[in-house]
Image (cartoon, rainbow, N blue to C red):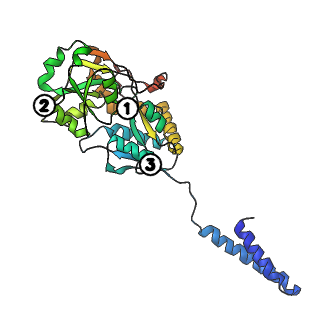
Amino acid sequence: MTIEFAAIEIATNQAASTLPSTRKSSVRFWDTWVAYAILGIVLFSAPPVFADKIKVIYPQPESADDRRSRYAVALLKLAMRKSGVEYEIYPASLHMQQNRALQQLTADNEISVVWSEATDAREKDFLPIRIPIDKGLLGWRIFLIDKKNAAQFAQLQTLNQLKSLAAGQQHDWPDVQILAANGLKVDSSMDYPSLFKMLSAGRIDYLPRSILEIWDEEQTHPGMNLVVEKAIALQYPAVEYFFVSRGNSALAKALEKGLRAAVKDGSFDRIFAKYNGKAIKLANFKNRKLFKLKNPILQNEMPYEEKDLRQDKDETTTN
């Protein structure tokens, strides 16, 4: 018996008990039918109750020319489609830098998910979905340089020679600490667009960028005489994850379920190839001098043992 009907029946019994016995039977009969009618109206007129939709709010790009988020957003949407949960997904209302997005994630406020380079500190502060969306290629770096300096870079033979030149990075990127810990000179900018202005103005000598980012950055800064350097590469352990707040385990579980499903059915590989396959081929690592660096801010084991989560730097997927 429902709570609503029990309440109605109690009221009916109380009313009937005050009547003469000859009338109790008929009153009780008709009042019982009235009670059922009222209950039906209550039940069928009440709005349906659904589980709350998971809100998936992601950061906007840092500037109008910033194409870096296209792949991550496409993969995020794919993962949520395959998660099997009810959700709504949309960008945050404001452009924001990486640190600001992470702060909003901490507050569980305007952002519910970010994609970012993993560090030990970030894995402690947030919930990482430990499926590398970059397939382990974030730490393979080549340089954006001023075209007039191409010959100078082609002559570099050792890491010590590279240490005499100034690299540029945004102030809140983990790579600032990684490069500095390996003895490289780093000048930082307050925001993303300023990096390219600094390079064009000669305030820095090169921008070490992921092979998954650099080609778009070359194309979106015409007229600045910036080109991708052809002879050198850096490599250090690095990985990019989706992160959510520690209190948002529902979204973390949904993302992991969706990403695992995408890995299993091949759609992860297809979307990765769509956005990154050409970049891997253009990097041409076989013909570059490789300088390996240490990453002192990422000690946690990365899930590279799972072959489906890796991408060989020399492979080019065409599907």
Sequence-wise, the earlier of marks 1 and 3 is 3
User: Is residue 48 visible in the rendered structure shown here?
Assistant: yes
- Amino acid carrying mark 1 in the image: Phe
State the quadrant of the N terminus. bottom right
- Amino acid carrying mark 2 in the image: Asn
Task: Calculate the distance from the C-alpha at mark 1 to the C-alpha at mark 3.
Answer: 31 Å
Give the secondary structure at mark 3: helix
x and y, in percent, of residue 89 in the image:
42, 49
In this rendering, the label closer to the viewer, 1 or 2: 2
Mark 2 packing: few (<14 Cα in 10 Å), some, or many (20+)? few
Q: Quadrant of residue 213?
A: top left
- Amino acid carrying mark 3 in the image: Ala
Closest to the observer: 24 or 168? 168
x and y, in percent, of residue 68 in the image:
30, 37
Give the secondary structure at mark 1: helix
x and y, in percent, of residue 296 in the image:
40, 24
Q: Quadrant of residue 231?
A: top left
Number of numbered discs visible in the structure rendering: 3
Q: Residue under label 1, please give it.
A: 272
Q: Residue under label 3, please give it.
A: 107
In this rendering, the label closer to the viewer, 1 or 3: 3
Task: Calculate the distance from the C-alpha at mark 1 to the C-alpha at mark 2.
Answer: 29 Å
Mark 1 packing: few (<14 Cα in 10 Å), some, or many (20+)? many
* Residue at 80% over, 79% down: 14
State the quadrant of the C terminus. top left
User: Is residue 266 visible in the rendered structure shown here?
Assistant: no
Sequence-wise, the earlier of marks 3 and 2 is 3
Q: Residue under label 2, please give it.
A: 225
